[in-house]
Amino acid sequence: MTEFSIFNTFAKGTKPAASIRGSNCVLYTRVSTKEQADNNLSLETQRKACTQYAQKFGYTILANFGGTYESAQNDERKQFTAMLSYVKKCKERVSYIICYSLERFSRNDNSIWLSGQLRKLGIEIVSVTQPIDTSGPSGQMQQKMLFLFGEFDNQLRRQKCMAGIKEMLLAGDWPTMQPLGFDNINTNGKRRIVVNQKGKLLRQAFQWKATEGLSNQAIRAKLVERGLKLNHQRISEIFRNPFYCGLMAHNMLEGKVVQGNQEPLVSKELFLQVNGLLDQNTHGYSIKEENDAIPLKRFVSCDSCTKPMRGYIVQKKKIYYYKCNTVGCGNNKSAKSLNHAFARILEYFKLDITVELIDLIRKQTIATFNQLTEGHQDAYQLLQTQYKEINKKIERLEERFIEEEIKPDLYSKYAEKYRSEKKEIEAHLLKASQQVSNLEECVDMAIGFATKLPFKWLSADYFTKQQIQFLIFPEGMSYDKQTDRCRTKRVNTVFAYIAYLKQLFSQEKSGIPELNLEFAALVAGSRIELPSAKQRI
């Protein structure tokens, strides 16, 4: 008996694939960077070569994939993944994946395994510029060797690139995109990273966290009011990033932190304070933040380099000093002397005049404030309009949902969005209304402070002193060692008018010599109608 076909039911193994393969294929083109797209390896060049190859051998092109910038170092590429998904679903129809070269297909250690998996599905990878017959072991070995050389070349490039990045970091230069709050500028061909307007808001956030002890959520709300929206997680990341105090942390530094060349947004001391690490510094001493002897630290900055002045004590003499830590600047001042100078400055904001004049000042301050904030009413009306519009959107959304015009998932998505917007508008409306209703109360509080201002500052604890300082001088003060004078860019409007009107009523010399400040310069644009001489008598 020579015919055994009847026994094929008991045979083992799998039947060999048909020797005649199909003629369907897909094309895959790729470049890693825009620079490659501009040279001879352009996407159009690759596509044209792959198309001509398919036409030459009579292949039918079922689909084109790629046509974009995708790194070949991993297989997470969107177009690459889409191509693999397509050929697996259409494995009965697709026989070839045609690419310009094997390195355009893949350049990692997964490529050999992937080519084997595709071959089991009856799909071969064909390189236009590297024609190899992969039907036998010899051709398959050649293809594997080319894949290995591609991976080896990748590893060499990566090693050189990583070494360059590490050297760049050790030199203090940041190699990638700068964090939020900084801009990249080029000056005479040299790259510099400087603080931008968002960075100035983040600097305030660090101050709020350190001096006022605000929660991240409260800080987020204050930043939103000033036009900077951040989620809670982002704020936490910013507070934990040493880049903001002039240092750099990166995976390539292998667990180390190095000094960076970027402009620091906050001092290292403030950064440590925000993160609760002031008692764990590497200098062998502890820093006492609440020190009544040096309340002006970080409030007063160096007039020369603009860096905040810090406080320290000379142990032998037991004398405190304020000092700028900028190398070569050498700006320092006795804390006792500068504290007394600040107390003398506060005397100019002390109301030690008659009750009748104080009442006139109160009325004039309220009138001036209303004049300066006249435009806020427009903002309040705009918020009311926005509030009405968001309510209409919510009502319309609910109507469409009830009438089954939209599905539940779409309703939930937009309902949550609109309610969040409504809540935010309500918060702004509440604050805007409080600004008007609490005005007289705020002025009374300011006048109450002003009648006993120097005493309140001298007798207060550290944090209260800090609050009083920033209340009157929101942007702090600077100290010039050469002239032994302080300066400030801004005085709280209420206190500026209190001091200015006090000067007018008492007919004293104008301004504050200790600050080289003329009140007229502060109030010139307000157009106040002051009482006449007869009215003042």
Image (cartoon, rainbow, N blue to C red):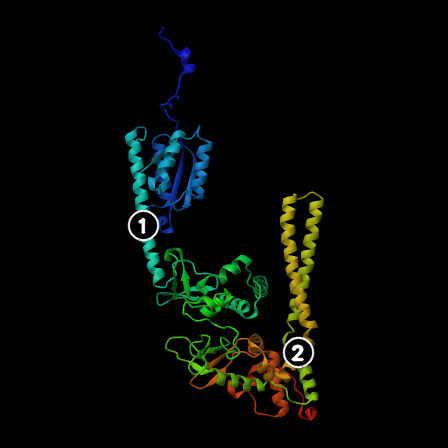
Q: Which residue is at the far front? A: 316
The residue at 68%/43% (across/down) is 405
Q: Which residue is mark 2?
A: 445
Name the disc covering residue 157, or none: 1
Disc sitting over residue 392 in the figure: none
Residue 274 appears at what percent x and percent y? 51, 66
Judged from the image, the secondary structure of the residue bearing numbered disc 2 is helix
Residue 460 in sight in this render: yes
Residue occupying image coordinates x 45% and y 33%: 88
Q: Position of residue 536 (x, y in %)?
A: 68, 91
Q: Name the residue type under label 2.
A: Met
Q: Quadrant of the rendered structure where residue 65 is? A: top left
Name the quarter where the N terminus is drawn: top left
- Which residue appears farthest toward the top when viewing the image? 1
Q: Residues within 10 Å of mark 2 (few under 14, many from 20)?
A: few
Residue type pointed to by label 1: Arg
Residue at disc 1, secondary structure: helix
Q: Is residue 439 above or below residue 209?
A: below
